[in-house]
């Protein structure tokens, strides 16, 4: 079923404008920041395809080349979150608290919630993937979503290759009837495409480096106002159609399987174009409001 995303977002935007007017009229809802205090801050990764909410197989989409495809799996790491003020000062979230695995099939994973000093932030940045420093650390130093413990880590999604290759930053799989049944396509006959993109530069020998720092200007859609006892949520749209339609447009049947190869660099270069700031929700008291 096709989701009327545009109508839903118009209604939500109207609600945000009303909420902003109420907050402006009521000073107690918009306290001045105290840098000695911390508040909750989150980035919401709202996965879409073009102008529609992400849906999985059998829902079909068409890329810029007119190739129809459906999506089976979407997962990606987000790490090293930083917040910036208008004066250029920045706050880097402690690394131990700054690794997340977004699973397109589990909406509960769409929030990367951290703490930050009170302040008005006009820009955020994060790494799509896992930084080289953490990728080189001993196994015991890789906790949470980076852990090799199947009960809490990434293993259930198979987001790791090996010591020199590191983590799979972005895993995107689906079906396209144009994929051939030979070794260049999908020999199983299931018409699958698989894009497993990673590479941190190598542990013991130089390799591909597909680490991408994504920077988002919040000013047009609303700065993040972090306050103690409340939550600020930056709502990003993540358009996975840009995997195909980004600056390096490519054909699915011509490149149905891209993993640890030189061509992965072209796909990784499309990643920044996936992210756009939709709006910011400030002074949130409960996740039910998001």
Image (cartoon, rainbow, N blue to C red):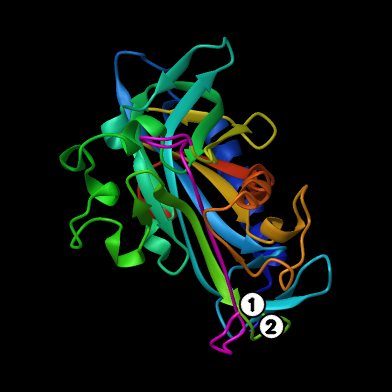
Q: Residues within 10 Å of mark 2 (few under 14, many from 20)?
A: some
Question: Which of the two discs, 2 and 1, labels the residue nearer the N terminus?
Answer: 2
Residue 76 numbered mark, or none: none
Q: Where 276 falls versus 121 (above or below)?
A: below
Q: Residue at x 67, y 80 (%)?
A: 176
Residue 61, position in %: x, y? 71, 75
Q: Which secondary structure lies at badge 1? A: loop
The quadrant in which residue 149 appears is: bottom left
Q: Does 193 lie within the magenta span? A: yes
Taking 27 as reference, is 198 above or below it?
below
Residue 287 screen position, x and y as percent: 37, 52
Mark number, residue 185: 1
Q: Nearer the viewer, residue 22 or 131?
A: 131
- From which residue to which does the magenta span run? 185-206
Q: Are marks 2 and 1 in contact (CB under 8 Å)?
A: yes
- Marks 2 and 1, how far apart at CA: 5 Å
At 78% from the left and 47% from the top, the residue drawn is: 247
Prevailing secondary structure class for the magenta stretch in the rendered image: loop
Residue at image mark 2: 180
Q: Residue at image x 75%, y 51%?
A: 246
Q: Position of residue 62 (x, y in %)?
A: 76, 73
Q: Position of residue 183 (x, y in %)?
A: 61, 78
* Mark 1 closeness class: few <14, some 14–19, many ≥20 residues within 10 Å: many
Question: Is 146 part of what is drawn in magenta?
Answer: no
The one nearer the camera, 185 or 248, is 185
Quadrant including the N terminus: bottom right
Question: Could you say which is closer to the camera, residue 10 or residue 224?
Answer: 224
Label 2: element kind? loop
- Left or right for 161, reference 8: left
């Amino acid at each position: 079923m096709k989701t009327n995303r545009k109508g839903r977002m118009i209604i939500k935007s109207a609600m945000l404008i009303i909420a902003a007017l109420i907050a402006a009229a009521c000073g107690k809802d918009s306290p001045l920041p105290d840098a000695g205090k911390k508040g909750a801050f989150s980035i919401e990764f709202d996965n879409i395809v073009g102008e529609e909410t992400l849906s999985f197989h059998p829902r079909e989409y068409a890329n810029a080349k007119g190739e129809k495809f459906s999506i089976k799996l979407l997962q990606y790491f987000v790490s090293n979150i930083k917040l910036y003020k208008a004066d250029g000062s920045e706050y880097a979230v402690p690394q131990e608290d700054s690794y997340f695995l977004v699973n397109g099939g589990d909406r509960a994973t769409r929030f990367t919630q951290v703490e930050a000093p009170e302040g008005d932030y006009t820009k955020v940045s994060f790494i799509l993937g896992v930084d080289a420093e953490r990728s080189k650390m001993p196994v015991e130093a890789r906790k949470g979503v980076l852990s090799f413990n199947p009960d809490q880590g990434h293993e259930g999604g198979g987001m790791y290759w090996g010591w020199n290759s590191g983590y799979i930053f972005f895993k995107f799989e689906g079906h396209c009837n144009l994929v051939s049944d030979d070794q260049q396509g999908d020999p199983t006959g299931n018409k699958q495409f698989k894009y497993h993109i990673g590479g941190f530069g190598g542990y013991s020998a130089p390799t591909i480096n597909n680490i991408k720092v994504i920077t988002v200007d919040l000013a047009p859609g609303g700065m993040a106002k972090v306050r103690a006892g409340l939550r600020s949520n930056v709502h990003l749209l993540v358009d996975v159609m840009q995997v195909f339609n980004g600056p390096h447009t490519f054909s699915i049947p011509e490149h149905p399987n891209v993993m640890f190869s030189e061509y992965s660099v072209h796909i990784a270069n499309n990643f920044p174009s996936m992210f756009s700031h939709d709006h910011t929700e400030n002074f949130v008291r409960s996740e039910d409001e998001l």
